[in-house]
Image: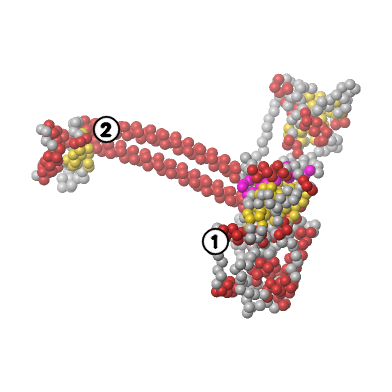
Amino acid sequence: MVKVRMNTADVAAEVKCLRRLIGMRCANVYDLSPKTYMLKLMNSSGVTESGESEKVFLLMESGVRLHTTAYVRDKSNTPSGFTLKLRKHIRTRRLEDVRQLGYDRIVLFQFGLGANAYYVILELYAQGNVILADSDFMVLTLLRSHRDDDKGVAIMSRHRYPIEICRVFERTTAAKLQETLTFSKEPDNNEYVKDQEGANNVSDALKEKKSSRKGGKPAESSKNTGDAKAKQVTLKNVLGEALGYGPALSEHIILDAGLIPNTKLCNENKLDDDTIQLLVEAVAKFEDWLHDVISGDKIPEGYILMQNKNSGKSNPPSEPGSSGQIYDEFCPILLNQFKSREYVEFETFDASLDEFYSKIESQRSEQQQKAKESSATQKLNKIRMDQENRVHILRKEVDHCVNMAELIEYNLDDVDAAIIAVRVALAKGTSWEDIARTVKEEKKSGNPVAAIIDKLQLERNCMTLLLSNNLDEMDDDEKTLPADKVEVDLALSAHANARRWYELKKKQENKQEKTVTAHEKAFKAAERKTRLQLSQEKAVATISHMRKVHWFEKFNWFISSENYLVISGRDAQQNEMIVKRYMSKGDLYVHAELHGASSTVIKNHRPEQPVPPLTLNQAGCFTVCHSQAWDSKIVTSAWWVHPHQVSKTAPTGEYLTVGSFMIRGRKNFLPPPPSNYGLWVVVPVG
């Protein structure tokens, strides 16, 4: 089963990685789902070497995960009330501290100092929670409220968050371990049972209380059940509950001691002092690593384990993202039980979490997309089948009308005789019952005209005749031909009845054509709508790697044919910024004597060499095309100067507006360029 939740060691390692974010300011808060939120943090200490502020996106999912991400995810168009509350209190504030509360799976983020501090508390156990508290830990808002009156704990709005109940990290002593492993008793059903992953006492007590309120089944209290449980106690379970590190870490410790994790513990199978000493040393070794993670300077590395397809064979580390990899586990330390499995190593544990969860998310999104595509395909197939069934029914009705008309034509004399006989009886005033009785008597006596009458519908002035195709079977006299029931109108002759069926056939054909046309239009519209919805959902569900935005992309820019970067301001403020911040020695300043012409700078990455003429001409054309000359269709020329000729000092009695500069010395004019402007789009392959 794929690992989803983080244990105590995971949280400690991730908190160590996230402490590098201290000093950044919260630029914004986004909600990706009702339980998943993303904080945008920016470096407030200044710009980087590229001239841009460092941006980090911190992803937190209640009860599940916490890590920074380099992948783009779709954000909610309308922020939730909880998101707005977070924005109100922590946006623009500096992240002052990131720490784990004790060694529980609770992470605390502190924004601001002193009385103006606010805390965002993330709980990663049970159902999880995200809590916003003030400087006194009074809860301002939270995702999920829960309380336990018996324990006197309430995690609710306008209540103080009980940070003092978190378990404090303490070294495991030999006496404590000795007592845990040698002391045996029958299980107490009223005793608090710890979460195997290390949840704190408050959360589990609340879960137990909630279960009792829902009418959950109480624990078995019989002695036999207790004895059965005692027989199933293993060394891994006992050590995991005693230390609170979870089953995976307990198995790692036991294997480190050279023991078998599934060793059953009972009164007859007690551990000797030497075995307990080995366990004490293994626990101390792990706790030394945990202490180094919490208080040391080294950033813990990360490992992602693949699903074990070839058990028993040692697999070397592989590259992330290679084909055929299925992620199964993540850990900040390569556990002993996983050393024989294939794994991917990362420089930091934070990077491994981002890779693991992002790939799981991507796979889940792909599965949902495939399910939606399958559902849409089934829906379209159903529409198509319904259309085909309706057309088939109409075609059968057309064929039926033709068959009825042909049967009447094959038996014109008999049909006329039957119609005349019934008409005569009705003209004499014979009752309907007497006519029906007479038809039956004539059938018994062998009257051929009465023999073809199947049923009288005199209330509708119709009757049903039994007719067969005698013309096609004239040579086969001995064969009994099947007869079809044909309805005829008593007011019409045989020819008129046949014509009536042919007219009905034409109506059915017209109806069939209209139905086919309407169904084709409806099917094409449904197919078009379905494809549009699937394409939109696919674009939203895709989780792609976040592209690095270069510092020059906020300006107008291009790369010349000789690989020189040329930047130009979009407005007066950017013109000012380009000259003051980005123009350096060796660059060239390009401008044109036209209204709206922007300041253009050619970045010379080889200051010892002059900028080639082709790049100068392209920069001049670029400058002219971004001026009023483009709209006015004026042919003019640009000019260039060196950086030391560009000054912000105006002559005496004059002043320079924002984005305007004083040029001293000779201007080097370029030939008038043609007003040609193109766009080159590079599409990545693969």
Mark 1: amino acid = Gly
Left or right side of 144 for 664: right
Q: Residue furthest right?
A: 652
Dot 1: element: loop
On residue 502, the disc is 2
Q: Is residue 42 magenta?
A: yes
Q: Is residue 252 visible?
A: no
Q: Is residue 124 magenta?
A: no
Left or right side of 302 for 466: left
Residue at horizontal 78 percent and vertical 30 percent from the top: 573
Give percent across and percent down for residue 550.
Answer: 74, 40
Closer to us: 193 or 290: 193
Left or right side of 672 for 530: left
Quarter holding residue 212 = bottom right
* Magenta range: 25-44
Q: Is residue 32 visible?
A: yes
Closer to us: 502 or 272: 272
Q: CA distance from mark 1 to mark 2?
A: 73 Å
Main secondary-structure element of the magenta-colored stretch: strand
Closer to us: 613 or 437: 437
Residue 366, above or below 662: below
Residue 680, above or below 68: above
On residue 570, the disc is none
Residue at horizontal 65 percent and vertical 60 percent from the top: 151
On residue 216, the disc is 1
Residue at horizontal 47 percent and vertical 37 percent from the top: 524
